[in-house]
Each structure stands twice: as structure tokens, then as C-alpha cells.
Amino acid sequence: WGGENEMDCKGLLFYLGSNGRAPDRSNPAKDWSNPVDRGLVTVTGSRWSAPGRIEDVVNCLPHVKQTCWSADSEHAWVCMSLPAGILLEVTRYTLRHGYSSGAHLRSWDLLVSLDGESWQVASRHVDDTSLVGGFGVHSFPVQAAGHPGPAKMFKIVMTGGNSIRGNQLVCSGMELYGKIHLPQQEGILKPSHWFFQGCT
């Protein structure tokens, strides 16, 4: 599942949220709804604070400005699980900051798992200043050496304080790119729906 730009409507979460429809470039939200609300993706994590919902972490629509963060707790985390029968070998992922100003992620791991018991580090960030500005967005390549193989679960875990030295995980968007692993069968990702040409 290939994408080069931040929130470009070419990732797996956009596909699931649009039920396999090609994006309407003039209005990407037209046929899209949160894949959690569609019952396709589950999101769990640390205790979350209003006004945002933890489910907003997988909102991958461009230009969204949704305040969204966890409670102030050390090693805050959020985890997204794909539908049954779909695995992704992640090669790139995108995060969106969940606030109009500071408290940006700086040190965190992207962990992946097949079963929720055994986890591998796909990408590690220490004092990473890529996320800047209000609702800033950045895409992060997963280096070849870090490719852990296909996974069902994807977890962001803070390993240090945010940009204001707090422990809130501030995130209002995520997207995943990479190689899909699944049987050649009909369904939400049936071969006739594979309209994205950027798959690797």
C-alpha cells in the first residue's frame, strides 16, 4: 500500500474507511468514515482525555484539526488492530499532531505484533523533532533493517516526554503504508478493489 505524501488518501486506513472507494480529490471526506466506526479497526490504549476520542487517532483525512491526546501518564500508548485476515508489512507510516500548539511527540517506538503478545520494534525515535506546528503532519519511513514482517497490530509507545516535557501522547491522525499479506479471496480487499498502484 504505497504513499509518499502525508495524509495522501493512498494508505490502508483511508482504504478501509472509504470501504474500498477511490478518493474524491475535491472532497476526500465524501465517502469516508472512521474505520473504527465501520467496525473494521479497533483502537486501544492509555486513558484518553476529552474532547478527543481515542478512535480519532486513526483519522487519516487530510486537513483535519481535531484536538486529541491521552491523559498525562508515563509511557502512554495507543494501539490499532487491523481486521481479521489482513496483515500489513509496514514500510512507511504517518502521524498527525493532535493540538493547535505544543506537546509534540519527540521520543517513541512503533511496535508491531501478530498476536498482541510478542512485539517487535519497527521504528524507534529519540528526540525526533519532525512533528512541528499546530496539527503538524509527518511521514516516517521504516528502514529496511527494521522491517519486522507482516503484522496485525501497530502500537505507538512514548519512551520519553513530549516537547513540553509532559507525558501526554498527542495525536489526531495516523496512516499506514506497506505490503498487504492476505489470501487471494473476495472481501473488503478483494483483488478487484486493488486500485492503488503504489503497492510494493
Image (spheres, grey):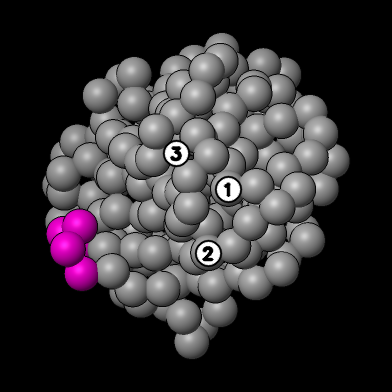
Q: Amino acid at mark 2?
A: Thr
- Asked if residue 115 lies in the magenta stretch, the reply is yes
Hey, which quadrant is residue 21 in on the image?
top left
Residue 119, numbered label? none
The reply to whether dot 2 and dot 1 touch (C-beta < 8 Å) is no
Distance Cα–Cα, label 2 vs label 1: 9 Å
What residue is disc 3 on? 13
Provide the residue span drawn in magenta.
114-118
Q: Is residue 32 left or right of residue 114?
A: right
Is 92 situated above or below 66?
below
Say which element carries label 3.
helix
Few, some or many residues within 10 Å of mark 2 (<14, 14–19, 20+): many
What residue is disc 1 on? 167
Distance Cα–Cα, label 2 vs label 3: 25 Å
Residue 169 picture location, percent across and down: 56, 43
The mark nearer the N terminus, 2 or 1, is 2
Say which of marks 2 and 3 sits in front.
2
| Magenta-colored segment: predominant secondary structure | loop
Hey, which quadrant is residue 16 in on the image?
top left
Hey, which quadrant is residue 143 in on the image?
bottom right
